[in-house]
Image (cartoon, rainbow, N blue to C red):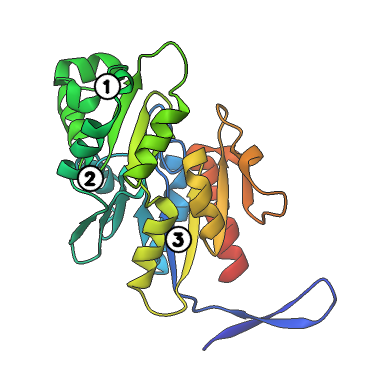
Amino acid sequence: MAQQMTSGENGLVAPRVRDLVVMVFTDLDGTLLDHDTYAFDAARPALAALTARAIPVVPVTSKTLAELQPLMHMLNLSGPAIAENGAVVRRADGAVDRAMSRQELAAVLDNLPQDIRRDMRCFCDMDIDEIIALTGLRHDDAQRAAAREASEPFLWQGTDMPPAELTAALAKDNVRLTRGGRFFHIVPVRDKAAAMAELLADQAAGTQSWALGDGPNDVSMLLAATRGAVIANPHVDTETLLPANHNLYISRGIGPVGWGEAITAFLKEDFD
């Protein structure tokens, strides 16, 4: 095993392992991709550096697998992927693991108290034109967004925030409530961190994880990883959600600029 000797703060010499086995797990919108334009030019050098070291990049997103496919093609990524906030995992061999089925999810909605369900406008209640009007997506993109396999976005139409009764009712069916930028989401208990752990379990013992994200739903994944990076987000101060004793990297740059900054720092720490 090749090692490089480096000097620490105390003057002692410590070995640095150069042939680590690493997988990178990354959020997309606002992290690897610009939130508004989906550009990633600023991240290209860091992506190339990972490719040169045969370090795979696994997208981890709230998007559906159908939405993810063209983005992975654009990024020249192949292999595993995590969709719908961890509810759907595609393994390296192409097998897809869903934390719950559409039928199970439909049963969860049917079991909700009628007065609560009445105030929920779910994707499954909408046609494509309504999804387009709400999201601004093009027709093909709206169809991909509607192809949910194991989660359900919804608009809350009640006068107040969704009641605690909704959270309690969902918990009885082993699902949970999360909030995105525009929609609430009903999702299985398996989150991004748990999905990451499942993919790591398929790898050789000792495989390390680098995780990057910019939002509240990324925090569990960032804290569970060997190295985690919070990418600066001008709209959400995700850093305030972290425990006081965290050791995550906090980027200065936003979106793909911050992504490249964090990956470059990790590579320098572990490989240079």
**Label 1 secondary element:** helix
Quadrant of the rendered structure where residue 119 is? top left
Q: From the top left corner, tell me how far across and down residue 217 is, in percent.
A: 47, 42
Q: Nearer the viewer, mark 1 or mark 2?
A: 1
Residue 130 showing in the rendered view = yes
The residue wearing badge 1 is 114
**Label 3 secondary element:** helix
Which one is nearer the viewer's eye here, 174 or 213?
174
Which one is nearer the viewer's eye here, 237 or 169?
169
Determine crowd level at label 3: few under 14, some 14-19, many 20+ residues with C-alpha closer than 10 A: some
Determine crowd level at label 2: few under 14, some 14-19, many 20+ residues with C-alpha closer than 10 A: many
Distance of label 1 from label 3 (alpha carbons): 53 Å
The residue wearing badge 2 is 65
Determine crowd level at label 1: few under 14, some 14-19, many 20+ residues with C-alpha closer than 10 A: few
Name the quadrant of the C terminus.
bottom right
Instruction: Name above or below for residue 77 compared with residue 109.
Output: below
Indicate the amino acid at tag 1. Answer: Gln
Distance of label 2 from label 3 (alpha carbons): 26 Å
How many numbered circles are shown? 3
The residue wearing badge 3 is 49
